[in-house]
């Protein structure tokens, strides 16, 4: 393989950071150095290879590998310059193009080409799982292939495979074997499995006697599939498949035992990376790019750390079966060195995430997470409106109505009175003078302003535009509110609203559809039962898994366009 590294240019096409002298980049595979590349400080985009350096061909075995490319530290301390830019930043690429200002080169992209000169097939974990047998003679190939195809198809289709289905797949094996031997035949059969609608879609088998519109109970294999995709976002494992084949999974006690087992598995992290990410809208982080001039220390690594912090909070609540209310009250979180420094926390070093206690009550729970605070901001300013709207929609399940037409945006509101810059609160007060805006903003703004001590990147601040920040306010019902801790207390005074919102979102995720009016009795019962057990998240999950909505389906009319398998 060849590893290709592209570097950042300055505006004139030269290497950004050329004034800092010679630099070297180490390329490593699984922590072991495989190449050390020295940069030509005079390279430019006009060169035949541009701002790209590449390694010679490097032998790497097939399979998962950890690849890194990192600059070698050349100096232990800062460089004394006429002007000292902010360390390790691309906030202003116009700097560092002349002597007197020292900036550092930056790696922009790492790409890998290959493989070249393949010497053979490595025995990877994937191949070991596929080839459960090895024929030693020609007459052993078909029985061995049938065993492999049956096993893979059963896992891929998430149910016991029937003999006639295996016969169909063996046709593809025979074609491939004639073309290139046993392994090519297995490859052809796997292609057929992976292109089958039974793999691509989660098709549930309707009993023949069920009429269109009639409700029926899922059989055990389909229940296993639903359960696995809900908790793991993956097909069922061998234990679930065996229970389903024996018809034992639909037993309430066994189903409950499996839920607890599955929540302890690493694969249950999908509830954080998929459900929580969708519910909390963490994907919106990608849309926010803080202004590099205003927030020069912010970078992609910090953004990813914020995202990971929120996922780890939710995953820990699942793994340790904690109360869902800890999403708001947790006096602990997970940080790496960069995120800890951003939050002002001491004693954390390295890139590994560690669990830390939070003494500052304003930083506790989701309302203190940089991910939430940043995705509800603009790139150059905080947005109490977006933050208030997010709390209402995501945590309280009460989205405000859309703004009326022809209402000016906050950007169109004056920013100063000539002698000083206004704070965001003051600009909102001017904006609310419009009667069309007042009815909604009196509900949204106090919630968002309670979080205004957090800047765009979630860092704590006490001033904005040299003016003291006022995070106090009054909710629509007259309740006083002040700061993030005050907002959290207000939400927890009515915990039923938060419980029901989470329950509705979790059930919608499990069922893969919107929640309807006829689902509400199940949600209320789930919420009541979980409340008797300390709001532990497992009881919300069990309430969904044991519900008729999860364990039953409805017959659909079959047309000529509908597959019969």
Image (cartoon, grey):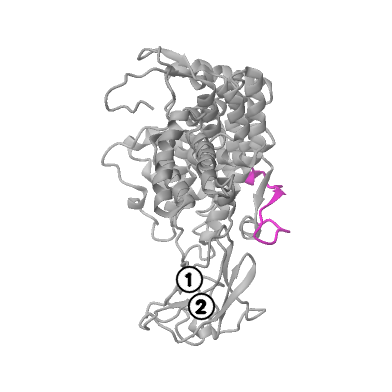
Name the residue: 57% across, 16% down.
525
Residue 453 can be seen in this image: no
In the displayed structure image, the side of residue 541 where residue 355 appears, left or right: right
Q: Which residue is mark 1?
A: 117
Residue 359 can be seen in this image: yes
Disc 1 secondary structure class: loop
Q: Residues within 10 Å of mark 1 (few under 14, many from 20)?
A: few
Disc 2 secondary structure class: loop
In the displayed structure image, the side of residue 49 where residue 495 appears, left or right: right
In the displayed structure image, the side of residue 77 where residue 515 appears, left or right: left
Task: Give whichever of 340, 417 is nearer the camera.
Answer: 340
Q: CA distance from mark 2 to mark 1?
A: 13 Å
Q: Which residues are magenta?
A: 344-364
Quarter placement of the C terminus? top left
Percent of width and height locating residue 235:
53, 36
Q: Residues within 10 Å of mark 2 (few under 14, many from 20)?
A: few
Percent of width and height locating residue 336:
65, 56
Q: Is residue 239 above or below residue 345?
A: above
Q: Is residue 345 magenta?
A: yes
Instruction: Choose top left, top right, bottom left or bottom right for residue 524.
Output: top right
Q: Which mark is residue 56?
A: 2
């Amino acid at each position: 393989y060849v590893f290709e590294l592209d570097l950042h240019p300055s505006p004139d096409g030269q290497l950004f950071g050329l004034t800092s002298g010679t630099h070297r980049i180490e390329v490593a595979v699984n922590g072991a150095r495989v190449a050390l590349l020295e940069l030509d400080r005079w390279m430019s985009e006009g060169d035949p290879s541009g701002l790209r350096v590449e390694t010679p061909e490097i032998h790497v075995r097939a399979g998962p590998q950890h690849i890194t490319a990192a600059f070698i530290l050349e100096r232990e301390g800062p460089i004394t310059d006429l002007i000292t830019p902010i360390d390790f930043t691309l906030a202003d690429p116009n700097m560092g193009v002349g002597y007197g200002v020292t900036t550092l080169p930056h790696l922009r992209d790492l790409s890998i080409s290959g493989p070249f000169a393949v010497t053979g097939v490595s025995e990877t974990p994937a191949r070991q799982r596929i080839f459960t047998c090895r024929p030693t003679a020609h007459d052993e190939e078909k029985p061995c292939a049938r065993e492999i195809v049956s096993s893979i198809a059963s896992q891929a289709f998430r149910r016991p495979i029937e003999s006639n289905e295996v016969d169909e797949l063996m046709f593809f094996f025979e074609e491939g074997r004639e073309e290139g031997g046993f392994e090519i035949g297995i490859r052809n059969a796997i292609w057929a499995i992976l292109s089958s609608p039974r793999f691509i879609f989660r098709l549930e088998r309707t009993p023949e006697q069920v009429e269109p519109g009639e409700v029926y109970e899922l059989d055990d294999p389909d229940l296993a599939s639903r359960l696995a995709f809900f908790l793991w976002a993956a097909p069922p494992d061998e234990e679930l498949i065996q229970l389903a084949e024996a018809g034992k999974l639909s037993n309430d006690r066994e189903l409950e035992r499996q839920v607890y087992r599955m929540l302890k598995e690493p694969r249950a992290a999908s509830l954080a990376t998929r459900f929580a990410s969708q519910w909390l809208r963490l994907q919106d982080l990608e849309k926010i790019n803080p202004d590099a001039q205003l927030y020069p220390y912010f970078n992609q690594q910090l953004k990813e750390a914020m995202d990971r912090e929120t996922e780890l909070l939710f995953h820990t609540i699942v793994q340790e079966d904690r109360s869902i209310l800890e999403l708001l009250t947790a006096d602990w979180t997970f940080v790496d060195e960069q995120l800890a420094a951003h939050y002002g926390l001491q004693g954390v070093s390295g890139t590994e995430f560690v669990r830390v206690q939070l003494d500052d009550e304003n930083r506790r729970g989701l309302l203190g997470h940089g991910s939430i605070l940043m995705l509800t901001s603009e790139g150059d300013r905080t947005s109490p409106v977006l933050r208030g709207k997010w709390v209402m929609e995501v945590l309280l399940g009460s989205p405000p109505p859309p703004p009326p037409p022809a209402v000016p945006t906050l950007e169109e509101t004056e920013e100063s009175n000539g002698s000083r810059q206004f704070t965001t609160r003051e600009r909102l007060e001017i904006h609310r003078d419009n009667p069309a805006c007042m009815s909604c903003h009196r509900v949204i703004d106090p919630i968002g302003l309670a979080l205004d001590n957090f800047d765009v990147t979630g860092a704590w601040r006490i001033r904005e535009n040299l003016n003291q920040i006022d995070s106090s306010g009054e909710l629509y019902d007259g309740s006083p509110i002040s700061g993030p801790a005050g907002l959290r207390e207000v939400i927890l005074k009515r915990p039923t609203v938060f419980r029901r919102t989470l329950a509705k979102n979790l059930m919608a995720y499990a069922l893969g559809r919107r929640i309807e009016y006829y689902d509400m009795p199940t949600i209320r019962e789930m919420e009541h039962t979980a409340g008797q057990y300390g709001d532990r998240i497992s009881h919300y999950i069990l309430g969904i898994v044991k519900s008729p909505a999860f364990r039953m389906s409805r017959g659909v009319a079959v047309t000529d366009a509908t597959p019969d398998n």
